[in-house]
Amino acid sequence: MQNKGEEQNKTEVEALPAEKEEAAPQKKRSEKPSKRLERIERRAHQALIEETLEALEDYKRCQNIFNFVSDFKLVDASIYDIQRTMSRYEYLIAELKRMNSGSADKPKMLRAVE
């Protein structure tokens, strides 16, 4: 009987490492979504930075056009374009600040991804 008991103990001891191996992949699985979310957030942040830089270039372009137009209708259109591009730029800057602060209000871009 002792031999059978010893065999059972060996079997139980051998089963323990297998249980640990099974537990390890579960831990890795729980880490993957957070890493994936971090990558998504980094990409969204980078895309927002690029879009902000493009908006700034649009704003500068509209200012240059305004400086060279002389027709009243073109001046009005240029002013409208400057205001439009400045509003877009200010919105994107606010989104970047919100993203960098880590506040509960996530940018719409990130809410759509989740």
Image: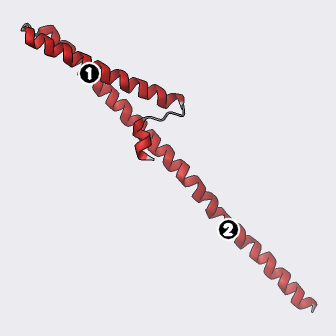
Hey, which quadrant is residue 51 in on the image?
A: top left
Residue farthest toward the left in the current orientation of the protein: 71
Residue 65 appears in the figure = no
- In this picture, is 78 found above or below 97? above
Left/right of residue 60 with respect to residue 50 in the rendered view: left
Hey, which quadrant is residue 76 in on the image?
A: top left
- Residue on which the image places disc 1: 85
Hey, which quadrant is residue 70 in on the image?
A: top left
State the residue in front, 1 or 84.
84
Of labels 1 and 2, the one closer to you? 1
- Distance from label 1 to label 2 (Cα)? 56 Å
Could you tell me residue 49's position as x and y percent?
Answer: 38, 30
The residue under the point 66% across, 62% down is 24
- In this picture, is 106 found above or below 72? below
| Amino acid type for the residue under numbered disc 1 | Thr
Q: Quadrant of the N terminus?
A: bottom right
State the residue in front, 80 or 44.
80
Residue farthest toward the right in the current orientation of the protein: 2
Left/right of residue 68 with respect to residue 46 in the rendered view: left
Residue 9 appears in the figure = yes
The residue under the point 14% across, 16% down is 77
Could you tell me residue 12's position as x and y percent?
Answer: 80, 78
State the residue in front, 84 or 47.
84
- Residue on which the image places disc 2: 21
- N-terminal-most mark, 1 or 2: 2
Left/right of residue 85 with respect to residue 100 in the rendered view: left
For the residue labelled by badge 2, is the local secondary structure a helix, a strand or a loop?
helix
For the residue labelled by badge 1, is the local secondary structure a helix, a strand or a loop?
helix
| Amino acid type for the residue under numbered disc 2 | Glu
